[in-house]
Image (cartoon, rainbow, N blue to C red):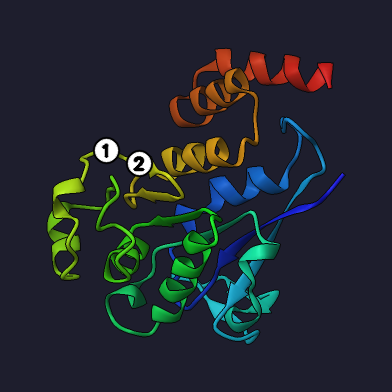
Amino acid sequence: MTMKTVHVAVYDTLADWEVGAATAHIANGAWHREPGTFEVKTVGLTTDPVTTIGRMRITPDLAIADLDPAGSAMLILPGADLWDGDDLKVFAHKAKQFVDAGVPVAGICGATFGLAKEGLLDDRAHTSNVAEYLAYSGYAGAQHYVDAPAVTDRDVITADSMSPFEFAREIFARLDLYEPHVLEAWYALFAHRDPAGYAVLAEYETAQ
């Protein structure tokens, strides 16, 4: 069984809440279609520790210069205050390398601004916090903006900052992490507090 690695970009002012649902459930294989096949690794500008907006300290597993799309199942880009400038443009450049190589990228909140500046949203359906925010990037894809919590178009996933569970659902679907009915149950439980979702997950875990 081949281990698949999902890489999560980490940097100062990272918005903690935006990716926690996705990373926790990628790493925890309880309901996975193929348990034990996914791991999560963090990627920084360097391997020096970073501080999230919630004051959590994270030491990256590797530096962005050492990340090869061929060794990754997906690159996840959280939002951060730094996306509006040029501090994180190296992550947007890496995202383009991933997409060019056919490896999916998922960006939420400010990361969608970086993807837009890199031209990755010019011809794809996408979303963000608001359409006007992306307009400041100068990108050419405004006509493809969708007013939705999260959107997947080919190898690019985008989401607004208020929708961590919708973002996670799109990521799980793109990774083919769960059986369809398990994914539906996961979303019902965690996004809508529907106890029927728990019953499905418990039954599936018992059957594994």
What is the C-alpha distance between the residues marked 1 and 2? 7 Å
Q: Amino acid at mark 1?
A: Ala
Q: Is residue 14 left or right of residue 185?
A: left
Is 134 located above or below residue 65 in the figure? above
- The reply to whether residue 126 is visible in this rendering is yes
In contact (CB < 8 Å): disc 1 and disc 2: yes
Q: Amino acid at mark 2?
A: Val
User: Residue 206's spot in the image, x, y percent?
Assistant: 82, 18
Q: Determine which residue is flagged by label 2.
A: 151
Where residue 82 sits, quadrant-wise, is bottom left
At numbered mark 2, what does the secondary structure look like: helix, strand or loop? strand
- The reply to whether residue 13 is visible in this rendering is no
Query: Which residue ends up furthest to the right in the rendered image?
Result: 1
At numbered mark 1, what does the secondary structure look like: helix, strand or loop? loop
Q: Quadrant of the C terminus?
A: top right
User: Residue 145's spot in the image, x, y percent?
Assistant: 20, 47
The structure residue drawn at horizontal position 61% and vertical position 73%, both measured from the top left corner, is: 43
The structure residue drawn at horizontal position 52% and vertical position 31%, both measured from the top left corner, is: 190
The structure residue drawn at horizontal position 26% and vertical position 53%, both measured from the top left corner, is: 123
Q: Determine which residue is flagged by label 1.
A: 148
Q: Is residue 131 left or right of residue 185?
A: left
Q: Is residue 140 left or right of residue 69?
A: left
User: Residue 135's spot in the image, x, y percent?
Assistant: 14, 63
Q: Quadrant of the N terminus?
A: top right
User: Residue 71's spot in the image, x, y percent?
Assistant: 70, 64
Is 180 located above or below residue 107 in the figure? above
